[in-house]
Image (cartoon, helix red, strand yellow):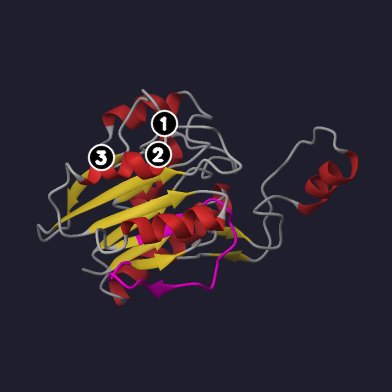
Amino acid sequence: MKILGIGDVIGKPGRDIIRAQLPALRRDRNVDVVVINAENSAGGLGTTPETAQDLFDCGADVLTGGNHTWKHKEYVGFLEKNEHTIRPLNYPNAPGRGLGVFQTKDGRPFAVVNLIGRVFMEPLENPFLAVDAALAKIDCKVIIVDMHAEASSEKRAMGFHLDGRVSVVWGTHTHVPTADEEILPGGTAYLGDIGMTGPYASVIGLEPAPAVKKFVTARPTAYQVASGNVQLRA
């Protein structure tokens, strides 16, 4: 099974490049499964039903989320209705689902689990314990894990924690692609962070000037999605 994982989609520039490139990528590389992290697809922050549907229309099979999943309240209902949209598993008592078992077009099953880290982020439920409980319920050979986390150490630890038990662990959230792709000793594929799909002439997808101003003044700043050097990272 050939799996394409696409990193955090940043606003309209990210959606536009997926629309332009994903159909050919899927066709030319015989991709069976496309998993996209959509948590920044609506104006750079959060997801809406419209941006989610846009990505499905472009060829996504499953959408994952992260810490901005709850930004737009109208997306919560979409999460609950659409089984192909998942949110981080270890949010306590949250709407929607943190994992799903799906099928390729030719009927082969695969599972996707979405986790969120706790280091430098919200003190949520333990993702390591949450995924252990989830795996006990999944009877599926191909298991994909999107670990949405800030700390490279936490993502790396999750890779080793799941090594030999899942097919792949990839990281999202930091918007910077890493060069640590490898097959871990137990056979699980690992990548610390896919990077973002959006404008790279930016500060993690946002216009540089307001971001710099925020660091210089420490005062609230109105951010906006950048536009230059848009790339699809996957």
Instruction: Say few, some or many: other residues with alpha carbon within 10 Å of mark 3 (under 14 / 14 to 19 / 20 or more).
Output: few
- Give the side of residue 92 with respect to residue 178, left or right: left
Residue 89, position in %: x, y?
Answer: 35, 37
Residue type, numbered disc 3: Ala
Residue named by callout 1: 91
Query: Which image quarter holds the N terminus?
Result: bottom left
Judge whether residue 72 can be spotted in this image: yes
> Is residue 89 within the magenta segment?
no
The magenta span reads 169-188
Residue named by callout 2: 88
**Which residue is farthest left?**
107
Dot 2 and dot 1 residues touching (CB under 8 Å): yes
Dot 1 or dot 3, earlier in sequence: 1
Residue type, numbered disc 1: Tyr
Residue named by callout 3: 133
Where disc 1 sits, the SS reads loop
Question: Is the residue 71 above or below the residue 88 in the image?
Answer: above
Spatial CA distance of label 3 from label 2 is: 14 Å
